[in-house]
Amino acid sequence: MRTYTLLGARAADGQPVHWPSSRPAGVRITWTGPAGKREQFELTDAVLPDGTYVAERVSMYPNRGAL
């Protein structure tokens, strides 16, 4: 199991978002932020200084209610 840091994503309290996953690098995940905005991230093999792995933002989707 790896812990990924979702680059550019912040939790409601302003802290970076950490995502535990056993999925391999290259897999895309979808995270829903505190404002309901869905964002897609790709898991990587890159390691940050804190020991977590990088999940890079791929795209953002509008809030479903805004469609």
Image: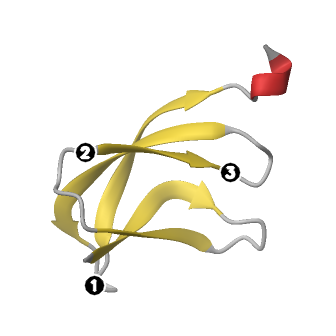
- Amino acid carrying mark 2 in the image: Val
- Amino acid carrying mark 3 in the image: Gly
* Element type where label 1 sits in the image: loop
Q: How many numbered callouts?
A: 3
User: Alpha carbon of mark 2 to alpha carbon of mark 1: how far?
Assistant: 19 Å
Q: Residue 33 carries which label?
A: 3
The residue labelled by disc 2 is 27
Q: Residue 51 carries which label?
A: 1
Mark 1 / mark 3, whichever is N-terminal: 3
Quadrant that contains the N terminus: bottom left
Query: Do the CB atoms of the residues marked 1 and 3 lie less than 8 Å apart?
Result: no
Q: Give the x, y percent position of residue 59.
A: 47, 30
Q: Give the x, y percent position of residue 2.
A: 27, 75
Residue at image x 83%, y 20%? 66
Residue at image x 34%, y 86%? 50
Figure quadrant of residue 54: bottom left
Q: Give the x, y percent position of residue 62.
A: 70, 25
User: Alpha carbon of mark 2 to alpha carbon of mark 3: how far?
Assistant: 19 Å
Name the residue nearer the viewer: 65 or 62: 65
Residue at image x 75%, y 25%? 64
User: Alpha carbon of mark 1 to alpha carbon of mark 3: how far?
Assistant: 23 Å
